[in-house]
Amino acid sequence: MNEAVILLSGGMDSGVLLAWAIRRYERVHALTFDYGSRHGAREQEKARGLAKCYGAPFKTVGLSFFNELFTSSLLTGGHEIPEGPYARDNISSTVVPFRNGIMLSVAVGYAEDRGISTVLIASHGGDHPIYPDCRQAFTEAMSRAAQEGTFSRVSVQAPFASLDKKEIAEMGRKLGLDFRMTYSCYKGGRIHCGRCATCLERKAALGYDLGRDPTEYEQ
């Protein structure tokens, strides 16, 4: 069977990736990670709903040690989430050390255990350069390591590596994804705050100023 494992955070990028993958693989296994982030509960809720909607087997993987070992404002034990657009001096506090590397390692092990040769991640060309484990070179390096370290020669792929977030949004619309099924806000409230960097990025990608963004925001 042609299968893949996807890192499904519940955000808009991974939601589009799931809608894309479900048309290309006979079965897509969705993994979401509970690593103690402020927005984790909302993201996991959305990830679970997306997996159910698209018929993807779903598992939540606990990574409780993140809050014990790492420092980041994105984690529940960190400082407050900054507001405003992405900028190195504004958003560097949200970096979670090697987050994607750890999650991809788990996903590769999961795939190897089941004889699956593909792991998908929604990293894209618009990811802010302050996050080193979102860069294409990093994904390619992880893929080489995974192939060397598995009998199934598992590859790690980022199909959106050459796309920006607006292009991903347009792809999602063409695929019929309801973006209300996804969640992005770093603050983790019931609705998106509309002020943090990821909310501002979501607004721009989905065309908030043009009335195309269905997301509910505080402001």
Image: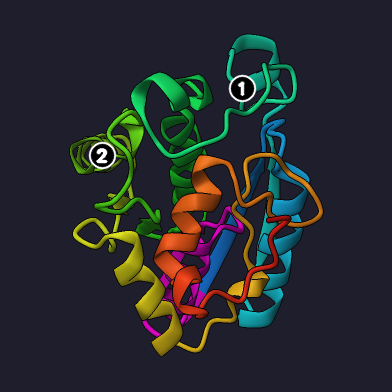
* Mark found first going from the N terminus, 2 or 1: 1
Tags 2 and 1 touching, CB below 8 Å:
no
Left or right, residue 82 beside residue 173: right
Is residue 196 in view from this perspective? yes
Quadrant where the image shows the N terminus = bottom left
The amino acid beneath tag 1 is: Ser
Answer whether residue 79 is magenta in the image: no
The secondary element bearing badge 1 is classed as loop
Q: Which residue is mark 1?
A: 73
Q: Position of residue 81 (x, y in %)?
A: 63, 28
Circle 2 packing at 10 Å, graded few (<14), some (14-19), many (20+), is some
Q: State the residue in front, 171 or 29.
A: 171
Residue 21: in magenta span: yes
Q: In the rendered structure, find residue 184 and report the number of the disc placed on it.
A: none
Is 184 situated above or below 78? below
Tell me what residue is drawn at x 39 percent, y 19 percent: 89
Where, by quadrant of the figure, is residue 48 drawn? bottom right
Q: Which residues are magenta?
A: 1-27
Q: CA distance from mark 2 to mark 1?
A: 21 Å
**Residue farthest to the right?**
190
Foreground: disc 2 or disc 1 = 1
Q: Quadrant of residue 128?
A: top left
Q: Is residue 87 left or right of residue 213?
A: left
Q: Secondary structure at mark 2?
A: loop
Residue at 58 percent of width and 74 percent of height: 179
- When the figure is inspected, residue 219 is found, relative to residue 54, above or below; the finding is above
In the image: residue 137, left or right of residue 32:
left
**Which residue bears the numbered disc 2?**
135
Instruction: Report the amino acid beneath label 2.
Output: Arg
